[in-house]
């Protein structure tokens, strides 16, 4: 399967959204709202739930499932208050020693004038910076599209999972084609050049795990995700909290490192 074919699958209309994973993976969930500064951005949903008896904070970029809900959730493109809400929940999780689980599915942050007026770039930068220093385990799962800084703002984690047909990219293939070739029709060539697939991300050490997709047996699939989360959280929670930021920093510093034999 080509990178472009996987891109189309990552954007498929019937693909489960973040809310579906939250419903299947966590019990006794309590959604929390607002950034305590401006508003509640519905493109990001988050709260507290139980993972087989373990209290966790969950955060998800939500696209919606039909036209009405997609308009309500801004097609999964968060505004600054969404990222600030997510950061508020992460800092709360750190205070109460709860692990953070993020579900990422976005073409990128909302690019409207109102978002820029309220500090979109700063909100993303603050989220990345604060995530790197969180003294609690963080696992992020790319469940569809992981686009640009809008995705990285919730993926500066100790572990990154990717569904097998999810993609992760610094820019959309359409945007890349328009910049490099001045021709948005060259999207397939751009997708190949960008190396956006889950296999690429594991190869480059951007992601640690590829999760097989089986949406026809979604409940069973989510059980596999749940088991992986529990296993990795057991390992991460055995690490002293004060050491987590340094290990997370080292993880990101190692991305793209290579050596040559003379």
Image (tube, rainbow, N blue to C red):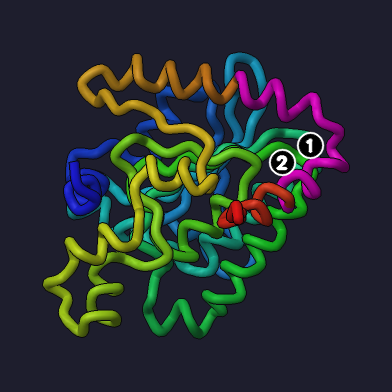
Establish if 223 lies above or below 160: above
Dominant secondary-structure state across the stretch colored magenta: helix
Residue 218, percent from left and from top: 30, 22
Q: Secondary structure at mark 2?
A: helix
Question: In the image, is 100 to the left or to the right of 198?
Answer: right
Task: Specify the quadrant of the image occupied by residue 142.
Answer: top left
Residue most toward the left?
185
Q: In the image shown, does 78 or 32 lie closer to the viewer?
A: 78
Seen at 46% across and 63% down, the residue is 150
Q: In the image shown, does 162 or 22 lie closer to the viewer?
A: 162
Crowd class of label 2 (few under 14; some 14 to 19; many from 20; radius 10 Å): many
Quadrant location, the N terminus: top left
Q: Is residue 222 magenta?
A: no
Quadrant location, the C terminus: bottom right
Residue 23, percent from left and from top: 41, 27
Discs 2, 1 touching: Cβ within 8 Å: yes
Crowd class of label 1 (few under 14; some 14 to 19; many from 20; radius 10 Å): few
Question: In the image, is 124 to the left or to the right of 199?
Answer: right
Q: In the image shown, does 208 or 219 lie closer to the viewer?
A: 208
Q: Can residue 258 be seen?
A: no
Which mark, residue 120?
none
Instruction: Write down the region rendered in magenta.
Output: 231-249
Residue 99, percent from left and from top: 68, 34
Seen at 53% across and 44% down, the residue is 59
Q: In the image shown, does 214 or 120 lie closer to the viewer?
A: 214
Establish if 208 lies above or below 51: below
Seen at 86% across and 33% down, the residue is 240
Which mark, residue 93?
2
Q: Secondary structure at mark 1?
A: loop
Q: How many marks?
A: 2
The residue at which mark 1 appears reads as: 96
Residue 232, percent from left and from top: 63, 25
């Amino acid at each position: 399967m080509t990178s472009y074919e996987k891109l189309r699958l990552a954007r498929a209309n019937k693909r489960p959204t973040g809310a579906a994973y939250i419903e299947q993976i966590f019990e006794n969930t309590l959604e929390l709202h607002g950034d305590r500064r401006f508003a509640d951005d519905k493109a990001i949903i988050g709260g507290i739930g139980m993972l087989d008896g373990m209290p966790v904070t969950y955060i998800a970029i939500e696209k919606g499932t039909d036209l009405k809900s997609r308009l309500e959730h801004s097609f999964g493109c968060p505004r600054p208050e969404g990222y600030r809400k997510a950061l508020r929940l992460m800092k709360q999780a750190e205070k109460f020693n709860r692990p953070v689980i993020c579900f990422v599915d976005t073409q990128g942050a909302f690019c409207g004038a109102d978002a820029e007026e309220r500090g979109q770039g700063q909100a993303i930068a603050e989220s990345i910076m604060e995530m790197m220093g969180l003294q609690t385990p963080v696992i992020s799962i790319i469940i569809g599209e992981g686009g640009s800084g809008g995705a990285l703002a919730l993926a500066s984690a100790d572990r990154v999972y990717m569904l097998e047909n999810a993609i992760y990219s610094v820019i959309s293939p359409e945007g890349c084609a328009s910049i490099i070739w001045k021709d948005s029709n060259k999207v397939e060539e751009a997708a190949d050049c960008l190396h956006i697939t889950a296999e690429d991300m594991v190869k480059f050490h951007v992601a640690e795990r590829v999760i097989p997709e089986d949406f026809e047996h979604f409940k069973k699939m989510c059980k596999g995700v749940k088991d992986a989360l529990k296993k990795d959280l057991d390992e991460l929670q055995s690490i002293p909290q004060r050491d987590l930021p340094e290990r997370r920093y080292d993880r990101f510093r190692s991305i793209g490192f290579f050596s040559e034999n003379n």
